[in-house]
Each structure stands twice: as C-alpha cells, then as structure tokens.
C-alpha cells in the first residue's frame, strides 16, 4: 500500500505556491485512511475563540479519562499566508493532527489565524502568541498541562511558529518547536505574490519576519522537517536553519527527512491508518515527550 501511495505522491506536481489541484489530490489520496467523527475515546471542543477576529478560533482534542495533566501540542496549518483552515468539514483535515496528538497521550489543539493581505506580518506570530495565552489560561480544564506546550507548524504555519519562537518575549510554557517545510529566511521568496501579500514591499519586513537569528538566540529545542519532494527552496530553508542550529549547539540539529513525501502529504498522512509509514508520527511523539517530561536523573 505504501509503495502505491508513494508512486502517486511522486506524480503530483508541487509548485510555489502550491496549487488547489495539488492540495485536493493529496487530500483525496489519504482521506480513506483517516478516522471520522465521532472519534473513539477522544473528546473534541470546537471553535473556541482565542481572540476577537472570526478566524481566531481553535479546536481542542483530549483523550477521555485523563487522570493527570498531559503535554499540549498546538498545530498551526499552512496555506501560503493567504488561505487555509484548522478544520475543513467533510474531510479529516486538520482534525487528523489533533487526533494524532490525543492518540499519543497529549492534548491536541488546532488553530486558524488571520490571513494576508488583510492581515500582514506580524499577524501570524501574534496569533500564535494569542493561542498560547488561551491555552495557558484554559487548557487545564481539558486535561492539558499549561506549562508543557510544544508548537507544531507546517509550511506558512511553520513560519508563524518560527516567528513566535524567535521573539525575545514569549511564554515560558512553550518548551519546543517542530517546524515542517517553513520559510525562515524570506529574502529568497521576496518576489512571490503570497509573500508580498503577507510582508508588503518594505525590505525591512523581510528581515524582521526572518527567524533564523532569533531561533538561534532563543535556545529553544527545534525539530526541522522537510520532505523528499519539497521544492528545492524548502530544502534550502531547512539547510539554512539546521546549519545555524549546528553553529549554536556544536552538533547536528534535530532533523527529519521524510522520504517519498511532498509538501502536502507530510501533514496529510499524519495519523493515517493501514499504511506502514509511521516515521513522522513516531518522531514527533518522541520529540514532544522528550521536551515535556522532567529529565531523568543521571546515575
């Protein structure tokens, strides 16, 4: 089954920005392998407002019968800064990420955010900050540990998460960042229409939105992911960030290369059943546990 899916993934043309046709093709490919509502032994709280704008909404996914506080994973979707939703009714997306988190013993949160061109930088990191504040205030009532948050972003969502992590002032409850095929240095993308919609024409905005230096200074643990069939630009972005993290830490960055995946399938396949591909699911779960569990004393 996985070989057949991989062949179909390789045939889907990935451009920058990603076309609606490519999005639909990937989603239709994985949809039959996902759970549908109601989710067994998972409670879902829909459309909680973390801010006044209509897009500042999030969903919470919590395992039933939580006896002690669980780590929280907040997922920030992609969409080229100009589109995307945390939930598309009638599809598994992106409930699949929240369900994955709950199935692994975490509390999952999926969020939408304000979009360009109506809302430009720093709207993305600002919305991540507002969602983190909502989680800090409210997640204990749903079994989550408000002091143990990991942010997971994909594509534009990874850029927003990275932008938040690069800030000098951020909530200490955020323990780590998982970044999937994001933009961390905007200069190579300055001519792209969606980037201009988000950052405008001021070169200073390109520098301000670029997060590599801030992430290095943050000392936050970072997991950097890229897919085999991502465009070269996203591989270059991953390399630039991992090189900078190497210079910071003196060792290789925590890096995950996803073979036989493209820019969309990397997140669309998360929590899919009846396929053999668990590389991302297992590495993400391990990353969350390592950075939200008290250190084991050395002997």
Image (cartoon, rainbow, N blue to C red):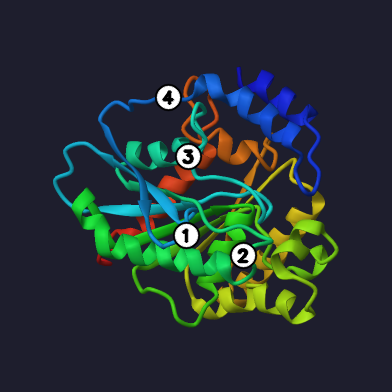
- Secondary structure beneath dot 2 equals loop
Identify which residue is drawn at 49% across, 82% down. Answer: 168
Q: Nearer the viewer, mark 3 or mark 1?
A: 1
Considering only order in the chain, which callout, 4 or 3, is on the residue closer to the N terminus? 4
Q: CA distance from mark 2 to mark 1?
A: 11 Å
Q: CA distance from mark 1 to mark 4?
A: 30 Å
In the picture of the structure, the residue carrying the numbered disc 2 is 119
Q: Position of residue 293 (x, y in %)?
A: 29, 59
CB within 8 Å, label 1 to label 4: no
Tags 4 and 2 touching, CB below 8 Å: no
Image spot of residue 218 (x, y percent): 50, 77
Which residue in the protein does label 3 denote? 281
Mark 2 surroundings within 10 Å by alpha-carbon count, few (fewer than 14), some (14 through 19), many (20 or more): some
Tell which circle, 4 or 2, labels the residue nearer the N-terminal end.
Answer: 4
Q: Is residue 177 visible?
A: yes
Q: CA distance from mark 3 to mark 1?
A: 32 Å
Where is residue 178? Give x, y as percent. 51, 56
Q: Earlier in the sequence, mark 3 or mark 1?
A: 1
Q: Which callout, 1 or 4, points at the residue further toward the start of the chain? A: 4
Residue 138 against residue 58 in the figure, above or below: below
Label 4 residue SS: loop
């Amino acid at each position: 089954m996985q070989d057949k899916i991989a062949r179909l993934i390789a045939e889907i043309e990935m451009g920058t920005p990603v076309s609606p046709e490519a999005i639909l093709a990937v989603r239709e490919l994985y949809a039959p392998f996902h759970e549908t509502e109601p989710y067994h032994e998972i409670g879902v709280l829909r459309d909680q407002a973390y801010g006044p704008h209509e897009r500042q909404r999030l969903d919470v996914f919590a395992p039933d019968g939580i006896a002690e506080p669980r780590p929280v994973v907040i997922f920030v979707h992609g969409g080229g800064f100009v589109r995307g939703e945390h939930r598309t009714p009638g599809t598994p997306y992106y409930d699949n990420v929240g369900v994955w988190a709950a199935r692994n013993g975490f509390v999952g949160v999926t969020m939408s955010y304000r979009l360009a061109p109506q809302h430009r930088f720093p709207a993305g990191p600002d919305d991540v900050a507002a969602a983190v504040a909502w989680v800090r205030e409210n997640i204990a009532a749903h079994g989550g540990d408000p002091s143990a948050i990991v942010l997971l972003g994909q594509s534009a969502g990874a850029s927003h998460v990275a932008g938040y992590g690069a800030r000098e002032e951020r909530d200490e409850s955020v323990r780590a960042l998982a970044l999937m095929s994001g933009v961390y240095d905007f200069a190579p993308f300055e001519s792209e229409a969606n980037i201009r919609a988000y950052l405008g024409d001021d070169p200073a905005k390109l520098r301000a939105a670029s997060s590599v230096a801030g992430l290095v200074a943050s000392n936050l643990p970072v997991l950097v992911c890229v897919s085999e069939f991502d465009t070269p630009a996203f591989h270059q972005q991953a390399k630039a960030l991992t090189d900078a993290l190497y210079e910071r830490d003196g060792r290789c960055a925590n890096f995950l290369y996803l073979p036989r995946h493209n820019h969309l399938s990397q997140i669309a396949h998360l929590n899919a059943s009846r396929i053999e591909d668990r590389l991302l699911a297992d590495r993400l779960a391990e990353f969350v546990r390592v950075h939200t569990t008290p250190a084991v004393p050395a002997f």
